[in-house]
Amino acid sequence: MQLHQSTWQEVETYLSQSKGIIIPIGSTEQHGPTGLIGTDAICAEKVAHGVGEEASAMVAPTINVGMALHHTAFPGTISLRPSTMIVYIKDYLTSLARAGFQRFFFINGHGGNIATLKATFSECYDHFATLNIPEQEKIKCTVANWFMIRDVYMLAKELYGDQEGSHATPSEVALTQFVYPEMIKTAPLEKEVAKGHPIYGASNFRRCYPDGRMGSNPSLATPEHGQRFYELAVKNLTQSYLEFIS
Amino acid sequence: MQLHQSTWQEVETYLSQSKGIIIPIGSTEQHGPTGLIGTDAICAEKVAHGVGEEASAMVAPTINVGMALHHTAFPGTISLRPSTMIVYIKDYLTSLARAGFQRFFFINGHGGNIATLKATFSECYDHFATLNIPEQEKIKCTVANWFMIRDVYMLAKELYGDQEGSHATPSEVALTQFVYPEMIKTAPLEKEVAKGHPIYGASNFRRCYPDGRMGSNPSLATPEHGQRFYELAVKNLTQSYLEFIS
Amino acid sequence: MQLHQSTWQEVETYLSQSKGIIIPIGSTEQHGPTGLIGTDAICAEKVAHGVGEEASAMVAPTINVGMALHHTAFPGTISLRPSTMIVYIKDYLTSLARAGFQRFFFINGHGGNIATLKATFSECYDHFATLNIPEQEKIKCTVANWFMIRDVYMLAKELYGDQEGSHATPSEVALTQFVYPEMIKTAPLEKEVAKGHPIYGASNFRRCYPDGRMGSNPSLATPEHGQRFYELAVKNLTQSYLEFIS
Amino acid sequence: MQLHQSTWQEVETYLSQSKGIIIPIGSTEQHGPTGLIGTDAICAEKVAHGVGEEASAMVAPTINVGMALHHTAFPGTISLRPSTMIVYIKDYLTSLARAGFQRFFFINGHGGNIATLKATFSECYDHFATLNIPEQEKIKCTVANWFMIRDVYMLAKELYGDQEGSHATPSEVALTQFVYPEMIKTAPLEKEVAKGHPIYGASNFRRCYPDGRMGSNPSLATPEHGQRFYELAVKNLTQSYLEFIS
Amino acid sequence: MQLHQSTWQEVETYLSQSKGIIIPIGSTEQHGPTGLIGTDAICAEKVAHGVGEEASAMVAPTINVGMALHHTAFPGTISLRPSTMIVYIKDYLTSLARAGFQRFFFINGHGGNIATLKATFSECYDHFATLNIPEQEKIKCTVANWFMIRDVYMLAKELYGDQEGSHATPSEVALTQFVYPEMIKTAPLEKEVAKGHPIYGASNFRRCYPDGRMGSNPSLATPEHGQRFYELAVKNLTQSYLEFIS
Amino acid sequence: MQLHQSTWQEVETYLSQSKGIIIPIGSTEQHGPTGLIGTDAICAEKVAHGVGEEASAMVAPTINVGMALHHTAFPGTISLRPSTMIVYIKDYLTSLARAGFQRFFFINGHGGNIATLKATFSECYDHFATLNIPEQEKIKCTVANWFMIRDVYMLAKELYGDQEGSHATPSEVALTQFVYPEMIKTAPLEKEVAKGHPIYGASNFRRCYPDGRMGSNPSLATPEHGQRFYELAVKNLTQSYLEFIS
């Protein structure tokens, strides 16, 4: 059940039964020579729609640009500054909270969003307390990172071992291949791939990780793997969502 | 050619040939008893992808939440405040401008975005002048509203006459039906529909327009109409885009 | 009745009879080789005072600096960024709204203000809803552009035809000549005048419009024309104001 | 020489001879039962124009709304929050600084502006250092309060003694009477007038100073006094200005 | 009684007896060749703790970074911009005000903080009025500058005459020597010391005051002097605090 | 070597040898019935000073108010909103970066700061890239949480087992007892202590954790334990710091 494909009267009916909503959040950032720039948004959205179906939950429009400043030295990356992301999501949630939603379940596809998202939640609780929203003290936000689910992590280790890496990973690339099998990219990949450098600013990042990958070998990905990741993620997050709204 | 379905190296190649990019912008807002909440985003995105194909242009991720504060008394609406939209799009364009994009062609699906978008463009030119972006003085932004194209307008008049109205219109509903024929909604529509009230705040808006429609009869829409609108919009905006980047 | 020439007790009395207030808004920007930098503020203020007298309405202090970023490559221009103008007018209206004013009628002298003003109105309605202002849902803002009044437009066409242009126009220059007949400026004007270029950033604007005029021939202006424009504007806007507050 | 009554080419010529500009700043706030709400702006503007003439200096448009939050419990008061005033004046000065102005001489009519103005100057110097303005390190701002000039103060003491007070003073009322002799207001004034209370928030202020006066007896004011204050202020500030720009 | 050395239950008990709190505010800025960078914070904190003991008042954590932009051309200086200081202190006081504190007594060690602090107080009163804080209209803020106390000033004149100067003064250096006798610094001091230049931006300040001192001779300071300043300040400010909260 | 106890010339000398600086960051928040409100700042500062001595590193003034919004339903807590903390630390670091510091090593005492700190670092790198700071691309920030050091964690487990909990822990209380043995607090502690509830807004937090503790038994703390934690933290973080700046 997607908010964008609903009418306002359907939302009104939904709210009489549930206060929960799923919000997919991704990023628009380089994912190495073969990864799609939209990888994080594509994965988060796909998983969120799956959870939405399983849990009969409303799914809000995907936040497709996130906090990816460290990737901005690669063309095609679009990033919000953290202070912008805070105010953006604050507005986003305020509209929903005024309408009566009380459980905001973010399904996140990008590690770089986590810190800012958590900061945003704190800012929002404080903001809601200044508004005249009935039962505002009941509002709860949480973020679930599909790629950090234990089952997903175990499968990635099993399939790729050390070559999973931590950015432009075969697991996320596989999931995008499952979504867009017609968009599988190929490009020569250096065998030696940079890894282990801490993340600082954008120019430093590109110097450390010249082709954008962080320790990963995305050429191992297949659409079939992607389907398996998808199914694991949906199964796990459906359960998490149902616990969250209960 | 969608940015989200490209790699950063493909973007690099694209930039060696073109500095233009298409940015679909919609809204998440009530569209009457039968219109989808995502109508404006769905239409803008569909048309943008069509233009992108015709013009071999890069299409950025859809800005799916816009300036819809006056609709926020209806559940399901999500809106940015204008000051938030300014800073959001400023960050969005700054990333692209630093990468070398110089022509930002917004394809817009929501009348309520226009004022804030124009204000944003002014704010951005001023901001770019403070950054060290080579050739920043060449950067240009423009907004094309698919629903205001003369041919589109004429067809809507021909098909619907006065019942086109100005919000939750049969033309935009038709376009969403063309995109999602499986999502055609039905609901009883009062024959008498409110119209002609100026737009002020959200509670005033809902009082004036109790079911969300503004003078429109969306039950006239058909997917076939939608296709005609789509094709007219793509044809016209492709030409506009090509002129804009030339 | 000017706010600046009233006492607070007179305002208190006024508020017991009317909730309306007129706010002149102009700009501080180049107006070609013979136009006054204050043109837009001078015209808006003059018309506003005329309407104030006709309608027995309170007139607030003139907002004399507006959104003129595209003119800032010419010395003497002063501009707010749109985000600043939003917060400035939000504070301005908040003070008045807390005192009990509910109808804000902007008389505007500058096309470049319109988009930001409309964005500001949206931001303000949303802001007022968060404050404890009695009857805040009754607050309404509107902008009336004296130079866009049909009668004014027709007279300009009749007097100047195509040489009216769209900036540093003979009509607005005429109105300033009517206000300050001792300040009529002369300077050599190129016969060929630029026109038709879209407006982007400041340096681009100056390159396109080297002497600041946009298709206009301000040497056609006379103080007598100015008086006629003034009278037409006052007559029309008095009626608009009275309808707005009723 | 008023900026609003100049053309951009006259400003260009002026800048080839002087980098100085005078900026009148007042307030829109209650001034007791007989004082005009515009008192501070009217006085600052009048004095500024006088100094402008004496010193052949450019005078910018009057900042007619200032920091008057403590007066906002009286109707008719309009105030900026300090954070808004900082960003407003920062934009205002940035435009002028980019054009080449380097000496900003504020002539201030309102004590409540002083703290925020000084804070603003600090913020501006820091901001200018981040812009590419040639010779930005030469930019200087100062504020001259006409009512604090020693000669003005002595005359007020001589004419009114203790009845000068500190708000809605006979001296400032006199100056407005000199400017607008047709606007002299009368109203019954309580003989006993509040004084000596520190200034905190708006509701506290009104409780302490029920009719808006702070220890003053404005009924002593005459237009002739006003002229004397005006002349003293112009003479003194002309000298201050000339020293400032030298 | 220091907030940092209390438990929340002790604070709860304290609030049942008093609504007052002392907030030391200093700066982190150069103090000439022999003055400690923390001078202003060290002095303010020491005096605040003394007053806290004398008056049995709660002392909040020291605000150790203030408004010192004009000193930032000297290494080691850390400054907030005024707009940042406003929002920082607004958050700081909002937490305390929500808990029930109503009298905020700032003990300040830095002249450069005063303007911004006063602006902040205005901003805070206005902000509190928008929150649901019981009795928010009773909230009062004040700033007491220990170095401007008449007795302190007289002693400084007596001990140092003209060599007190106005920055990196022997009086403040003496107070830090009293606090940290093991941290007394020596360095060659030019006999000729700059003085009398107005303060503008940071690079100008350093040009005018090359070693950071403003007309002062800090080599006159002794720890014994410092103790005398401390005792005078504590005695005077204890009385001021008690009056303020009564 | 504390910045507050240095002169600017000593800082200049230091910078010729090292670009690193240690920044202690804590919080001002309830720590249960026996924990000091300043616990997190006290611990971070103590450890930072220890590391500063071991590593001959400069230590900046302690950031003693952090992100503790979820604790604000307990009196005595003072919190910044995340958006405020971002701009506060951005100003803080900008001053230091302009002076030439390039390695910012935060020693943190509060888990609630981590997300916002990481968001801040991203915002700062992006900000520095817009300033004219030489070698700005070399700037690196990192946060080290003393309570998460493996050795510290192991010792806490060994000493307290499950009773370490996650807020108002015996380990942090012990460290404050080591610093202020005269400030050891006692209060009756319920044997049953709440734990395991996720953290949402402030009122929810207090409902879940009525006395402020999260699963901890701080009565197990002793000053001797505190010393052991201190020594472990200093030893470990000295090594981390030296690696970070190398």
Image (cartoon, coloured by chain):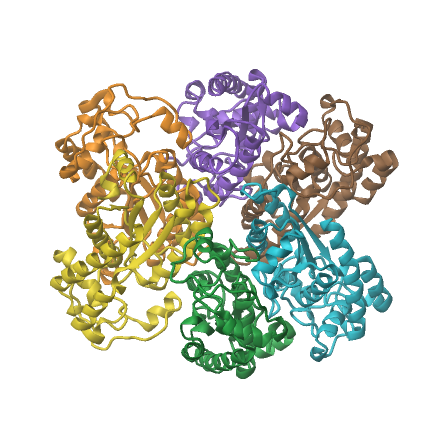
Chain colours: A green, B cyan, C brown, D purple, E orange, F yellow
Q: Compare residues B175 and D155 and report the one nearer the observer.
A: B175
In this rendering, the answer to whether E67 lies above or below A217 is above
Viewer-side residue, B164 vs D24: B164
- The percent position of residue C41, horizontal first and vertical second, equals 67, 35
Q: Name the side, left or right, on which E198 lies relative to B22.
A: left
Q: Where C13 sits versus E201, above or below?
A: below
Is E235 left, or right, of B88 in this rendering?
left
Residue B80 in sight: yes
For the N terminus of chain F, which image quadrant?
A: top left
Q: Position of residue B160 (x, y in %)?
A: 83, 68
Residue drawn 59% across and 75% down?
A179
* Nearest to the observer: residue F96 or residue B54: B54
Q: Which residue is at a point 67% across and 72% down the rendered structure image?
A: B36
Residue F72 occupies quadrant: bottom left
Displayed quadrant of residue E50: top left
Residue at the (56%, 29%) spot, across then down = D42
